[in-house]
Each structure stands twice: as C-alpha cells, then as structure tokens.
Image (spheres, helix red, strand yellow):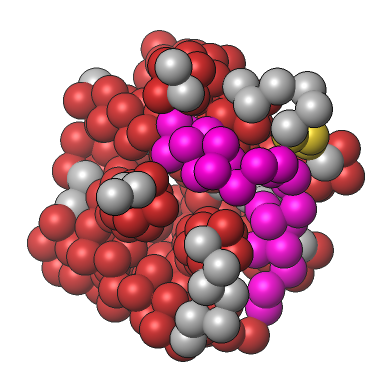
Amino acid sequence: MDITVPLARLLVLAVIFVNGWTDAPNAIATAVGSGALSFRRGVLIAAACNFAGAALACLCFPAVAATIVELVAFGDPRAAVTALNAALMSIVLWAVAAWRFGLPTSESHALLAGLSGGALALGAGAASLSAGAWLRALVGLGLSLPAGVLAGRLLRRTLAGKLRRPALWQTWAAALTALLHGVQDGQKFLALLLLINGMDGAADAPRLTLVLLTAGVMALGTALGGKPIVEKVGSELANLSPADGLAADLGAGAVLLLCSALGLPASTTHAKVAAVCGAGRGTDRRVMGQMAGAWVLTFPACGLMAFLLAKLMMG
C-alpha cells in the first residue's frame, strides 16, 4: 500500500503544530517580557487568537495561499509527493533544532526553501519554480525587516507618556498580533493541504474541514508553548517597558497586516523581532546576531536537507 500521501498529510499537520509551537509565541513575547502577561495566560490568548485568525484568513483572504500553491510546479504526482514529504521533514527538523537553542526562526521561509529544494530534486524536467511567487516572497522578506524597525521606533515615540495602563493595552495588542499570525501562516499551511489533495485526486474535499483542522492544530501547538523563544525575544533581545512592548506589538501587527493585504508571504518572527529592535532599548547585538545567523541559514539549510532527503527517498 502506498503511504506517501497519508504521510504527507501527517507531516503537514506536524509542520502546522511546530509552527504554533515555535513561531506563534513571538506574538506574546513582548507582553510576557515586559510583565504585562504571565507566560501561561499569554499562550492561551495566543492559541485562541491564532485559531480565529487562521480560520478567518483561510475562508476570506486566500491571496497568500495562492502564492504558496504557485511557488512550485511539481511534475509526476508520485515523485511530487515524495519531494513534498522531504520538504516537510526538513522544516520540522530545522524548527526543532532552532527551538532547542531558543532561536526564533521562520517556518514561512523554511517552507519556501524546503518546497523548492524538494522540487529541484525531481530533476529539471519534472519541476520548476515560479519566479513571480519567489519574487513576492523575497519582497515580503525585504519589506518586513526595515518596516518593522521603523514602525516600532515611530510608535514608541508617538506613544511615549500618552497612555494610561499600557499593560492592559499591550494585552490587546498581543492578541491582535497572534490573530494576524494566524492570518498569515494559516493560509500557507492550508495551501499545502490543498496541494496534497490535488495530488491525491481529492480536490473536492470539504474546504471548511481543512480550514478548521489547520486552525485547530496551530492553536494546539501554540497552547503547549515555546517558552525558550518567548524569553529570547521578550527578555534577552532588548529592554522593554509595557509601553515599549505595546509599540513593538503594534508595529509588528501593522507590518503583517500590510503584507497580508498585498498577498506577500511575510514572517511573523522577522516582523516581531524587527519591531522589538525598533521599540526596545539597549538591543543585545549578540542575541540579534544569533537570530540573524539562523535566518540566513534557513534558506540553504532547509533547501539542501529537502533536496537530499528527496533524493534518498527516491532511491
């Protein structure tokens, strides 16, 4: 019995879970680091908002999902599922390794690299990459970092001394950031499930079922938490008061909302860390260097792992 398609579905669910586990906690990192929220309360809020955002976006705003589906054109369906499995394995391995060292990485960019590496392993005649989709992904990457820093800095100056009870406002801002994370990443992983259904000839599978499954698994991963990453972003990267944390949350949220509206696959991690650097004080260059190093390695590491795993599985 051919188990490659069922395996692909299980691996997509594993990637969705890992995304919630390692990426979504960034939404509440500043609120926890500044003392506005406890870690446990924060992850519960993030889990609920991730579920709502993923479900809303998958149903109403499919532009990012369309970019992911367009990114790679697989050839032979049987070989394509094998390559996809290799891509998903590379994403899980990379995310777990980064979590072990408390480093926030982008599953979004790991996804792009893994899909491309797995597709290229099929050979030049069996797979091709969409230049347009890759360009949108790179524009999202290039936009989110400087825009995050600028938004965080401007909002810190704008809000300085003007808010009463900033910790309360930061709780709401963290919830908004988690919602927008679900909006961005929920679409990407729904796209993978739809891609697998197409390979399996199951294009008519209920979309609502897939939407709820994507949102639910992401929320479960978030609820189980990613405490080392929360501590790294919220406490070690920069000194944050509740007002600074609020500026970072709003800045990251603005960047994610802009990228989602433009159909650009953006990284919650990159937007949030950039906004923290813009809004925070005394940014730790060593910690920032560790994060930047992980980001730089994501594309070649995931692409190469997926390429090699696909070659190995194809014998």
The relative height of residue 276 versus residue 264 in the rendered view (above or below) is above
53 vs 192, nearest the viewer: 192
The quarter holding residue 22 reads top left
Q: Is 252 placed left or right of 217 in the picture?
A: right
Number of numbered callouts drawn: 0
The majority secondary structure of the magenta stretch comes to helix
Q: Position of residue 94 (x, y in %)?
A: 37, 27
Residue at 19% across, 70% down: 44
Residue at 64% across, 85% down: 60
286 vs 11, nearest the viewer: 11
The relative height of residue 270 versus residue 116 in the rendered view (above or below) is below
In the image, residue 85 lies in the stretch drawn in magenta: yes
277 vs 302, nearest the viewer: 302
Q: Position of residue 231 (x, y in %)?
A: 23, 38
Residue 191 in sight from this viewpoint: no
Residue 123 in sight from this viewpoint: yes
Q: Is 139 placed left or right of 147 in the picture?
A: right
Q: Position of residue 11 (x, y in %)?
A: 33, 47
Q: Position of residue 81 (x, y in %)?
A: 50, 44
The quarter holding residue 127 reads top right
186 vs 228, nearest the viewer: 186
In the image, residue 42 lies in the stretch drawn in magenta: no
The relative height of residue 87 versus residue 230 in the rendered view (above or below) is above
Report the span colored magenta.
61-87
Q: Which residue in the rendered view is the most extreme toward the right?
A: 132
